[in-house]
Image (cartoon, rainbow, N blue to C red):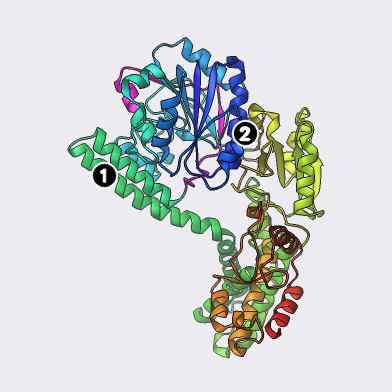
Amino acid sequence: MKLSVIVVSYNVKGYLSLCIASALKAMEPLGDGASELIVVDNASSDGSVDWVNLNHPSVQVIALPENVGFSAANNRGYAVSRGDWILLLNPDTIVAQDTFIKVFEHVSRHPEIGGLGVPMFDGSGRWLPESKRGIPTPWASFCRLSGLWRLAPRSPRMNGYYFGHVDAAETADVEVLSGAFMWMRRAALDQVGMLDEAFFMYGEDIDLSLRILQGGWVNRYFSEAPIVHFKGESTKKGSLSYVRVFHDAMRIFSEKHFAGGQAWAMRWMIRLGIRLRTVSAFLHGWVQRHITAVLDVALSAFVAWATLEVHGAYTGMQHPLMPKLTLTGVAAVSAWWTGRWFGSSDQPFQRLRSLVVGSVAGLSLVVVYSALPETLRVSRLSALFSGVLLTVVPYFVRGLMVWLKPQSYRWRTVRPKVGLLVPGSGMARIREWVEGSYGSSLDVRTLDADNREEVLEGMATCDMVLVGSEIGGKHCLSLLRQADGTGADVRIVPDRLLLALGGIRRDGAPTARLSWGADGLGRSDRMRVKRRLDIFWSLVTLFMGSGRGKHGQAFGRRSAWKVLTGKATWLGFHRGWEGDVRLPSMPEGILFVGSGDRASTPAEARRLDLRYASDFGWMRDLELLMNLRKD
């Protein structure tokens, strides 16, 4: 047998379905009986094993009773494999139909190759630097963990970890392969051994790559067979928890391969790198969440200060420092609280909301100014003019962000546009899903895969493009790469599952950019209205105490404090039915939507939850809470 493909999965059924479908297609050119696909499941709880057995009976499934880790699970698959070549393939990957045949032709001409990796692109179309790597020496690991490699990405010294001196489009010998796609010769593995099970997750591919080199073999980066790697669906690689797990893996690696001063330097560099990453991750996350509000506050304060300066220069009237600082502070606070209250940072941005926020901020400034004592007042004309200018600040900030970075920011359209690029009979299935689940308020367009201009126009104008996986791995990768940098949210829909995978934001449903119905809770503004109602009713409950009847105790002050602190909501989803992961995220409910009581059947729970998610109304909620308090 030529090839054994081993896939280790853990609670990624949607991505696993894409991976299996594409791998089976790529195995066809090798010939009948020339390859095998082995799935090793690490005790998933999402039904992955049953799904694979039902939909792909030709795939050999090894269901482990517990999560033994990446290394041990791959070793279980290797123990039963029969191929001359072994491919370790992550479940969150898509390969093209010609990937395996291209790689096989290359390695067949080069007997020195022990292992091979390929270019990988993530779900938003960006090339992943971990496609090729060098040995993680103490300095290389420090540059990687601290982020210094970004300052000189082509430098072999600053970016030795990602082998920066080798171009992404160049086929070349490298030192370390990625475990997401690790093609290896069985003869090499028989010589150096398989994965070291001391590595639970991460570091095992580095250790094995180094042992392949030490065994006299070559590791090759083959640039002519790119794949999609959605990257970190089970682990979220950008998180600090990932950094800590990575640290443990590097510690094991350094103790195994380095000695004396090198081992000590490795541990010290890693600790320092993690501290720097912790700080940078916090700052980056804070900026990502609050950049719009920060710009609003900064520009509003600048406008107020500049207005006073211009007025003073024009009239010769110099305002004292304290009144100037007071007006500037009032402008900043007005911009902050109005933006927070109205949710003007919600994306995509809304033009009307931006103007409303600016108008309320300007009015707030004038009202607060009029209430200030005489000693803190400035020129009335300056205060009034500052308030007028504040009305356009939010709109100007958002317009500037959309203009400078269209790949990240957009204005909300009246009817969100969804492009469907699905071959054959799958189109009807996906159209029915989108229109049935996410409301008739969407503008759903059909895109012709053979019309390149129409596809590019669709990616430029649609809020989201859903691509049927039946189109093939090569076309999926091509579309994701075309979308990179354009702001288009291109997602892949598996053949047998209704999920939208990949894209700018990695989640299982198109709720990141689309509204859940006309008044759906998938919209952050509707969720914010619900939160305001929760706060209001919590204050009422704290003042009035428990209610009467069978729901009386639910309205106790303890529940009110729980809701007030955001740990619960007064009316929550029932859940407990298949597909409830598609519901908008919100805290557990004190009571259940519909009647306050839990639904008697999953079908009834589904009906009530979907109706509430797609047609939320705060007046209906308030009426129900008032009735439940008395009954």
**Is any part of residue 100 visible from this angle?**
yes
Q: Which residue is mark 2?
A: 481
Residue bounds of the magenta highlight = 210-238
Tell me, for residue 205, which label it has, or none.
Answer: none
Tell me, for residue 267, which label it has, or none.
Answer: 1
Magenta stretch encompasses residue 219: yes
Magenta stretch encompasses residue 9: no
The spot of residue 269 in percent (x, y) is 29, 44
What distance separates the C-alpha of mark 2 from that of mark 1? 38 Å
| Residue type at numbered disc 2 | Arg
574 sits to left or right of 158: right
Which one is in front, 343 or 241? 241
Estimate how packed mark 2 is, as few (under 14), some (14 to 19) or many (20 or more) residues with alpha carbons within 10 Å.
many
The spot of residue 406 in percent (x, y) is 66, 47
Mark 1 lies on a secondary structure that is helix
2 and 1 marks in contact (CB < 8 Å): no
